[in-house]
Amino acid sequence: MRKSIATVCLSGTLTEKLTAASRAGFDGVEIFENDLLASPLAPEEIAARTADLGLRIDLYQPMRDIEAVPEEFFARNLRRARHKFELMRRLGADTVLVCSSVSDQAVDDDALAAEQLGRLADLAQECGVRVAYEALAWGRHVSTYDHAWRIVEAADHPALGTCLDSFHILSRGSDPKGVEDIPGDKIFFLQLADAPLMAMDVLQWSRHYRCFPGQGGFDVAGLLRHVLNAGYDGPLSLEVFNDVFRQADAGRTALDGLRSLLALEESGGVSPLPAPVIPSGVAFAELATSDPEPVGELLTALGFSRTARHHGKPVDLWEQGEARVLVNTGTAGRRTDTTLAAVGLETADPAASARRAEALLAPTLPKRRTAQDVPLESVAAPDGTEVLFCATGRPGLPSWTDDFAPTAESATATALTIDHLALTQPWYHFDEAVLFHRTVLGLSPHDTVELADPYGLFRSRALSARSDGPRLVLNLAPSPEEGGETRARHVAFAVHDIVAAVRRFRAAGAGLLRVPANYYDDLEARFDFAEGELETYRELGILYDRDERGGEFRHCYTGTVGHVFFEFVQRSGGYAGFGAANAPVRLAAQRR
């Protein structure tokens, strides 16, 4: 299906927005009136620029407070409409959006609304324009799509149809199945937006917190199926009001929007994509640094051994049990703080994983390898993290481990695995990152968690495959561009006995993050513990959480090296979370 985006979704001038939409691959745009008014270009010049970019102007919007008003007001509305229809002729646009009235002058009279919209449609038809009537969720008298359709049906005019907007329908909790009762040729336009589920005024919710389909909590795919069942064959168009999008790079935002529509088409059964190959685990976490000594000391204390070295690159492989960490010092002489730079994900078919990533517009990274190197497919996540698709030791497929020559050290037999990876995101890439990992990698998002940080609000959202598959936690910390732990990422290792693991760690001369005594006093008030258990946690700096089903989570943190730290976790009883209740204590301790 054709794909369109409203200029209000993007930052910049109108010409910058049009260029971004074209480069991303959209077929058309909705031109928002404010963008046109602020442009120095004449409508004919905008039309020519749009055509040169391979775009069509699918909608001009909005016209407000038109219907169900006293006659003297409606006469002025028709005069205004005649000017706008002439403007649209100069633009080459043939459909205008008319929003249900919010004016104090509007009366609750469906017959009057239908009669006046019919007269507006008469004028539109004379000018070669169609009118798409949309119910605003906060409309004064018309606030639901079925009410708007009843008025359109009563007007019975060929130049008058309805516009359906997923936000206005789903934010009110309306049943979208009724959309199928609207004839497809009377659905003149479809606007799509998602949003996080929030309890707030619907107008403010709409104006500041909309997001692209797949980034929020609405069933936009379900709505799309109903619209298609009705027979709609027009463009899928994004209309998103979002404070972050208005400040972010227009090109990235447009690309993210198109990715959301591609994934939405797949979910709605419109257009198939290469099937996702769900990752089965984490092959490795790769740290980049110009000074390997501090992280090497920390890994040694954690029980890791440097078991192998890449045959042609300054990359060491550290192992313990099934957990693998690569330490890459190939920074070309630059001073680089230690950071979590790449993730290897286990997949049964790396080539298929790469095909899906490419179909969903993930940037493929250049292959910097010699003829002797194992070929690996990789893409860049929105935050710049390299994601490599791996098949470790899988018969018939190349294994990245073949690039490494063993050292004299051997891995310890401790049963250690990577439980999850936590990746702190720039504030303007958070929703983009959620959509990327959900659609490209096939991971399922958990609910968003918001926590109090000593210097602001800490936002977090986890994504996972299966209970035994890889888990990623995307964090949006306050002031992510500042130094310190607000930008830090970490690797969490799963252990069977966290107390024994911590004692070994401390015996190796390393220390854990110091936890205030007040925290353990609070634990004693909240939970019952076996004799001596809480005292052990207090002594060792172990944090604790318990879910409503009795599942338990014990975890602790190392100090930070550069922008990386490590975590030990022990899960029992089916606990599936990440100890969110303890995050404020951890964040405050790291700040100290």
Image (cartoon, helix red, strand yellow):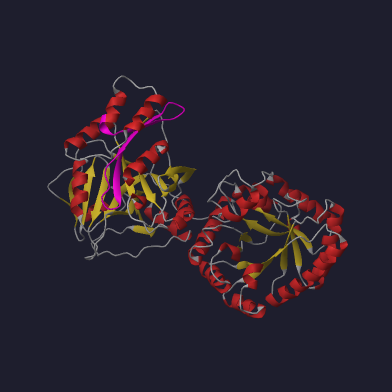
Residue 577 sits above or below residue 227 on the image: above
Q: Is residue 348 visible?
A: no
Residue situated furthest left in the rendering: 408
Q: Which residue is most to the top?
A: 531
What x and y, as percent, mark residue 61? Answer: 68, 65
Is residue 339 left or right of 12 when viewed as pictured?
A: left
Q: Nearer the viewer, residue 257 or 208?
A: 208
Q: Which residue is drawn at the image coordinates 67% and 58% (left, top)? A: 190
Residue 557: in magenta span: yes
In this rendering, the count of numbered labels is 0
Tell me: residue 352, above or below residue 371: above
The residue lying toward the viewer, choosing from 7 and 27, is 7
Depicted 79 relative to depicted 542: above or below? below
Q: Residue at x 30, y 54 (%)?
A: 339
- The magenta segment is 539-568
- For residue 192, which quarter of the picture? bottom right
**Residue nearer the viewer, 230 or 6:** 6
> Which x, y percent locates residue 355?
43, 58
Looking at the image, is 447 positioned above or below residue 250? above
Q: Can residue 453 be seen in this view?
A: yes
Judge whether residue 13 is colored magenta: no
Residue 257 locus on image (x, y percent):
54, 60
Q: Position of residue 263 (x, y in %)?
A: 53, 54
